[in-house]
Image (tube, helix red, strand yellow):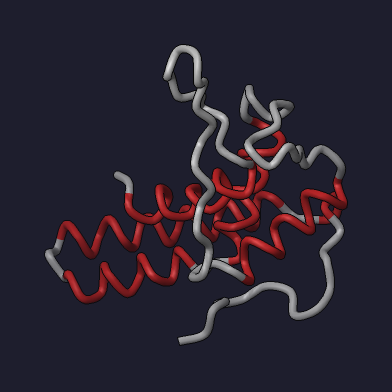
Amino acid sequence: MPSQANGPEDETPRWEAIDWRFHEGNVRRLRRRIFKAVREQDWANARNLQKMMLLSWSNTLLSVRQVTQLNAGRKTAGVDGEVALTRRARAELAVEVSRTAKSWNPLPVKTDIYTKAQWEAATARDSCDHGPVSSGTGP
């Protein structure tokens, strides 16, 4: 099984040239197919569609957009100290997430040593990796 279902080969896409409606439609149709397969109890098809969703370029783009543009904490740096706010950084993050979809190990979140409380400061990369998973397996 390839590590990437579709998307750019060796080039970074131009973030401002992305047709978001097209990619949202792709993800919406795939989610609808997953829902239908589960409703009909076609577990093999549902599992295959979920795998397709995890490797989907459209789903990766929407996850990166959610984390870097739409979320309220988009300007908060994670454990790695990086924030992807420029168009180029977002596009590079999308390509990186897409290429390493199966081999990424998330970093632990920060822990405050004085209060022993965990901060919700996961890296942008970790959040982008979580997006396709929650999109493909959620209701």
Q: Residue farthest to the front?
A: 114
Task: Classify 44 as above or below 98.
Answer: below
What residue is at 71 percent from the left and 35 percent from the top?
69
What residue is at 64 percent from the left and 25 percent from the top?
73
Residue 74 in the image: state x and y as whole percent. 69, 30
Residue 138 in the image: state x and y as whole percent. 32, 46
Q: Which residue is nearer to you in this view: 55 or 27?
A: 55
Task: Classify 103 as above or below 61.
Answer: below
What residue is at 42 percent from the left and 19 percent from the top?
116
Q: Which residue is nearer to you in this view: 57 or 118?
A: 118
Tell me the quarter of the image containing the C terminus.
top left
**Image quarter for residue 79?**
top right
Q: Is residue 19 left or right of residue 106?
A: right
Q: Which residue is nearer to you in this view: 103 or 3?
A: 103
Residue 112 in the image: state x and y as whole percent. 52, 21
Q: Residue farthest to the left?
A: 41
Residue 85 in the image: state x and y as whole percent. 81, 37
Q: Is residue 59 left or right of residue 19?
A: left
Q: How many marks?
A: 0
Task: Classify 60 as above or below 44.
Answer: above
What residue is at 49 percent from the left and 70 percent from the top?
102
Q: Residue farthest to the top?
A: 115
